[in-house]
Image: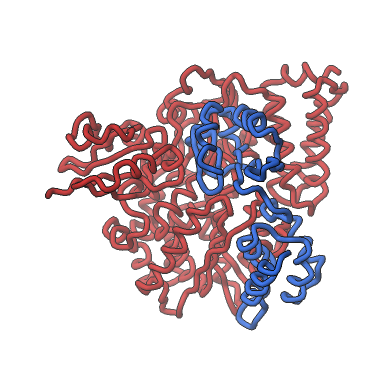
Chain colours: A blue, B red
Amino acid sequence: MNEKSSLNLDLILQRCRPHDSKPVNVLQTLLAVQDELGHVPQEAVPEIARTLEVTEAEIAGVLSYYPDLRTRPTGRHRIRVCTGESCVANHSDRVLAALRKKLGITLDQTTRDGRFTLERVSCVGNCAVSPTVIVDDQVHGRVRPADLPQLLQEFR
Amino acid sequence: MVMTRLYLSNDTSARAAGVDRLARAWEGTAGLELVRTSSRGAFFLEPLVERETPEGRIGWPNAAPADLPRILAGKGGIPVAQIPFLAQQTRVTFANFGLTQPLSAEEYVAHGGGEGLDRARALSPEGIIRELKTSGLRGRGGAAFPVWNKWQVARDTQAERKYVVANADEGDAGTYCDRMIMEGEPFRLLEGMLICALAIGADTGYIYCRQEYPAAARTLQAAIEEAEEDGMFDLKSGHFRLEVLVGAGSYVCGEETALLESLEGRRGVVRAKPPYPAVSGLYGQPTIVSNVLTFATVPSILARGGKWYAAKGTERSKGTLALQIGGRVKQPGLVEVPFGLTLQEVLDRFGGGMAPGARFKAVQVGGPLGSLFPSSRLDIPICYDAFAEAGAILGHGGIVVYDDETDMVELARHFMAFTADESCGKCTPCRIGSVRGHEILERIQAGHGRPGDLELLADLGETMKTASLCALGGRAPYPVLTAIEHFGDEFRRGARG
């Protein structure tokens, strides 16, 4: 962690400290840290544990349980391909294969230039216009492999 | 200058289908006002542009930016109310969808919002619960437990504090009606939760919203602030505090006890029941955990009476059900109908047949834990009893249609891999069973199946069904075993070894 991120971490943890009206919430604390830093660095675990007055094991347990909590930074843009049943029925596997080929990476990898990280997601409730590809916060529906180049163009 | 007002949906799926492209292209056009509403749920028509006329709304389906002159000239539109997909529905919970702006409390009230809460305020807690009992409403998240019964138990349990929790962890693949409610008519959810708070005597509520629904969480947050300003949360018994908490991608957190663990900030591991949450839930206090759709149905029941609601549907499945059609059909979208239509009728009447070039192979009802039906079994009525009898579930109302290019072994493997990924690990049948099941399916897929593998899967399935702690392990075998039952040849090809 650099100086700036450890400063930010201090600020977040201030807000998450246990007090009378609000019991400690490990998950929400970790989500707040991730919102700020993009991921939850392993080396932040002891400090988070100290502030919340819980064991490091408790933090590590929650951190490893939830798929959306990340301990490593992602690329500048996250591409998520939905593998929910409606997307599967609409052959999202073909979209995923095209993305792998185009980016030269497989799931949970980041392109060498740090531009994209490729992930899958289990249903985002966009089933009526599936298959779905999400780039950062942009949800795209009815995606065909041929749409991908244009879809990714604006993300540098 | 006369302003022309065009209505566009702001729903995530409508936006994913390209509505924003139209909005961006048309913004700033002189004499044009764009109003962003909830979605009709007829997603196959999105981007759908609507205009108000004295005869009702006129719509331009699948519109493109270049269609603006045509729309402004009033040419080529169709009366929205006459679109068969919409005209054949019985909309109760989704009656206002496509009409109103999600965050306008004024429009909500103008369309009947708040009447249920007003009625509840005039009733005693027992009176509210009686109305729900008359309505026959059962939990719409999947468990289908009588709602009044839960509320009665929470009401009768003495405690320092009681909670109302909305399960907005709509994780079942193929379902999106909760997302539509949260994005489209958030006040309806708030109203349902407040009625519950009045009935059980709760002063605090939480909405546990899945991380995959950022727009829903934002809309709810804004709706809560708006409702707070309007004094909606001031109950006779005191102030009701409501908060949105976001999850972190765990499917099993849609199970009510895992959800409570997650709300408390821990690993979302399932708790053994009893005690049920209505007796001992969040922080050990009586808690009503209900699905978003369930809460959102309550205001209509209070406003128009339990009897009115119970008159719809069948003898033991009363009211309406929100079905969500997806997969390889021509007309995917939200369908609210009374219980009792057959699966075939729903697919024909609303699904509109297969997508161009696709041929039907199977349909799955009830999410990733739901059974598969081949074309010969589509005469099943959509109601709790018929589905229970068939060993199937309605779940949260998701219907996904697969075409004949679908590889059933791969699909079965996908289901088991999903359970292995998502198992919380608390009980052995689910934790180990899903991994072993996945291994067997992998070797069948690779053509290295051993003699007896299909029997082994069936046996493993029985163990998981009877001995798992929650529905994840208990239901996981169903899609796999029904795939084997109806498409056995595909499995036997790989199982010969």
Q: Position of residue B215 (x, y in %)?
A: 48, 53
Number of on-image labels: 0
Question: Is B78 placed left or right of B138 in the picture?
Answer: left
B465 to A66, vertically: above or below: above
Residue at the image point whose x is 83% and y is 48% from the top? B428
Q: Is residue B392 visible?
A: yes
Q: Can residue B388 be seen at all in this image of the molecule?
A: no
Which residue sits at x=67%, y=66%?
A5
Q: Residue at x 47, y 57 (%)?
A: B295
Judge whether B451 appears above or below A104 on screen.
Answer: above
- State the residue in front, A19 or B292: A19
Along the line of sight, the residue nearer the viewer: B449 or B256: B449
Residue toward you, B183 or B297: B183
Residue A56 occupies quadrant: bottom right
* Residue B476 found in image quarter: top right
Location of the C terminus of chain A by quadrant is top right
Q: Is residue B78 left or right of residue A155?
A: left
Please report the residue visible at 77 percent of the width from the left and 36 percent of the height from the top.
Answer: B461
Position of A151 compared to A2: left or right?
Answer: left
Residue lying farthest to the left in this orientation? B1
The percent coordinates of residue B106 (x first, y second) are 29, 62
Picture coordinates of residue B355 (x, y %)? 47, 23
